Amino acid sequence: MTRPTSAAESELLALLTLRLTPGLGPRRTESLRRHFGSAASALAAPLTALREVPGLEAKTVAAIGTPGPREQAEAELHRAQVAGVTVLGRGLPGYPEALEALGDPPAVLWVRGELPELAAVPRAVSIVGTRGASPHARALTRALAADLARAGVTIVSGLARGIDTEAHRAAVEAGGLSLGVLGSAVNHIYPAENAGLARQLVLISEYPLGTGPAQHHFPARNRLIAALAAGVVVVEGELKSGSLITATHALECGRTVFAVPGRAGDPRAAGPHRLLREGAVLTETAGDVLAELGWGEGPAAPLPDLPPEQARVYAALGPPATLDDLRGATGLALAELQTALVMLQLLGRAEEVGGRWARR
């Protein structure tokens, strides 16, 4: 007997079907959803009604509702379920509110791992920079990401070589949560040498499973890196670099841009220096970021030596918070969170008062 399908599942299938229909990008898919009230209604609409939607070419209209894209969508959802990957649709539960800051949020996202709640302005910071980073920039990135993670800030980056890798690794080693936004599918890690690191991150992509990296994917990926954080820190980057593209997207999203000054004459410092001349926040420590975003005047005290899950929870503790608050901040499942809190309580590092948890 076939299991009944919920309205949300039906709408997700419809959104994915539109996503896989030739000629439909994020903007056109959203136009259809808004015009007809839902993706499912758009798929069921007659050709005469579809022709009334502005911006659709005749061949795109003819492709909407044909069997091929729906069959592909059904197969993709099955593959995702088998792979332990979550598929999220815009306008449906779990989709990051932060992405609504974009002019063209993805209709569908693929997520590997437990994605925390990402509010309109999330407690997250993106750190980006060149692949060929200097030793000084690498060390500064590690300190910046670790201190932010210890202050309960989620670190977002693109899993590329260089600055991205340093930021992800430092955040994880500090017991924090880090999101890797990919220019390939979440089951196709690029570069391959970061496969081990990727297993410690929450991975996000707007590309179907099996999609490999492509040059045009990365500028699109950069807009997600910008929107998923309250601010973007550019550590090193040349004038024509992905880092500056990310900074531009951040400004368009109303996010704060931070830049780390570099050595005069070094091409890798040219990008941050331009951003500083244009009004970016001069950044040398995590305290600069936290103060500018109103999250405190400096990083929290160094974490005690704790197992990773306990360290993550301890970093997220500050003002008294509910279990739901802490789940969103840490990305942990409820059972894992409760276990970590009990252990911290036994160690004398956390306390529960009136159903809320705080550091002790």
Image (spheres, rainbow, N blue to C red):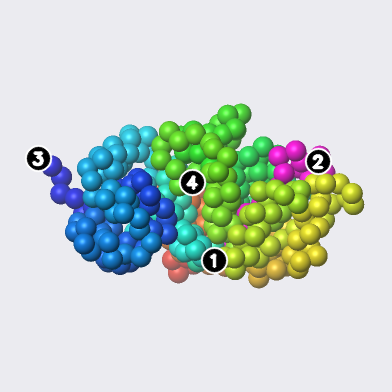
Q: Amino acid at mark 2?
A: Ser
Q: Amino acid at mark 4?
A: Ile
Q: CA distance from mark 4 to mark 3?
A: 34 Å
Pointer 1 residue: 121
Of the two numbered discs 4 and 2 on the same chain, state the one appearing first in sequence: 2
Q: Position of residue 87 (x, y in %)?
A: 37, 47
Q: Which numbered disc covers residue 204? A: 4
- Crowding at mark 1 (Cα within 10 Å: few <14, some 14-19, many 20+): some
From this view, report whether residue 306 is shown above or below residue 328: above
Residue 227 seen from this side: yes
Give the label, 3 or 2, closer to the camera. 2
Q: Of helix, strand and loop, which one carries label 1?
A: loop
Residue at the (38%, 58%) spot, across then down:
28
Q: Of helix, strand and loop, which one carries label 4?
A: strand
Of the two numbered discs 4 and 1 on the same chain, state the one appearing first in sequence: 1
Pick the quarter of the image with the C terminus: bottom right
Of the two numbered discs 3 and 2 on the same chain, state the one appearing first in sequence: 3
Q: Is residue 268 left or right of residue 168?
A: right
- Residue stretch rendered in magenta on the structure: 123-138
Q: Is residue 200 left or right of residue 262?
A: left
Pointer 2 residue: 134
Q: CA distance from mark 3 to mark 2?
A: 60 Å
Q: Position of residue 89 (x, y in %)?
A: 36, 54
Pointer 3 residue: 1
